Image (cartoon, grey):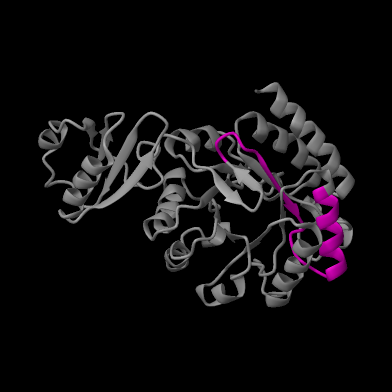
Amino acid sequence: MIVALKPGVQKEKQDQLIDWLKGMGLDIHISTGEYQTILGLIGNTEKIDTELIESLDIVDSVKRVSETFKCCNRKFHPDDSVITVGEAKIGGGNFCLIAGPCSVETEEQIIEVAKSVKAAGANMLRGGAFKPRTSPYDFQGLKGEGIELLKLARKETGLPIVTEIMSVSDLPLFSDVDVLQVGARNMQNFDLLRELGHTNKPILLKRGLANTLKELLMSAEYIMASGNENVILCERGIRTFSDYLRNTLDLSAVPMLKELSHLPVIVDPSHATGIARMVPPMALSATACGADGLIIEVHNDPIHALCDGAQSLRPDEFEKLVGKINAVREAIK
């Protein structure tokens, strides 16, 4: 249920209403906009007398929300959420570029790539330390050592670091990571999502290989309902009948998610296509359709990469792409 307050309501009266609603066993999500304050009532609202609340002199309107996702619902939070990571911002008109290798391999590799993507205009550095691989015989990442190397690259460049967490038990290793990524295979790892909700770190939540948008939003709800509102949604392609690309990049998800939710939405064209030459056109398309950012794989030696070299851009290719992305952003202003 949503309670919209009239403009200019005294804080004392607002607090009295909130205390009364909490006394009925409800959690209250407060969204203060430029012109109006919205109270999102979370819990069993069936016993709430909407006519009584609507009759209060500080209340503008009362609406019931039929969607099962509440915290991430735009009705609860009409304004775009802006997630701040260091000096970078995502959402609310702020565009963010996240770039780096699929896997952290060596100190020299990650620092070289970090310096090149920063020079090209990246706002954050991505790099996998823990790698969920289909085959148990493939490179699984450097794990804790990989995180330490990412931290060295951050020290060298100042770029915030983004890396994937796969298990609740690994959470202590991520205490100094700036953004925790939940990969497609873990989108519905509800124990992990609940635990991440108890942190205050930004969470980059990727859509699962065969999950609906509603399921993605419900996964975000797990994190937010546990107390962490710093969630970034990521469209990274879904499984379809496509036989030439790794996945099908569902760009229609971007405007739909932004209509349904106030959370920032970014796109991963690297995992969606699996082919380096396909990344630039899809990155530009994602920018044009309103994405709040991109996460792109960049490797200084893709041919010899230990993971996903076929979809990784070289630093010079990334630099050229950034120029085109900026041109598209300027064109759609």
Residue 64 shown in magenta: no
Q: Residue at x 70, y 29 (%)?
A: 329
From this viewpoint, is residue 241 visible? no
Q: Residue at x 14, y 46 (%)?
A: 46
Q: Position of residue 20 (x, y in %)?
A: 16, 49
User: Can you say whether 81 is above or below 134 in the image?
Assistant: above
User: Can you say whether 175 is above or below 29 in the image?
Assistant: below
- Quarter of the image for residue 320 reads top right
Report the side of 65 relative to 151 (left or right): left
User: Over which residues does the magenta segment extend?
Assistant: 91-118
From this viewpoint, is residue 41 visible? yes
Q: Position of residue 169 (x, y in %)?
A: 52, 77
Q: Residue at x 58, y 59 (%)?
A: 183
Q: Quadrant of the N terminus?
A: top left
Report the side of 205 relative to 135 (left or right): left
Q: Quadrant of the C terminus?
A: top right
Q: Nearer the viewer, residue 25 or 208?
A: 25
**Total marks in image:** 0
Q: Position of residue 236 (x, y in %)?
A: 61, 47
Residue 97 shown in magenta: yes
Q: Nearer the viewer, residue 290 or 176?
A: 176
Q: Residue at x 52, y 62 (%)?
A: 186
Q: Position of residue 64 (x, y in %)?
A: 23, 37
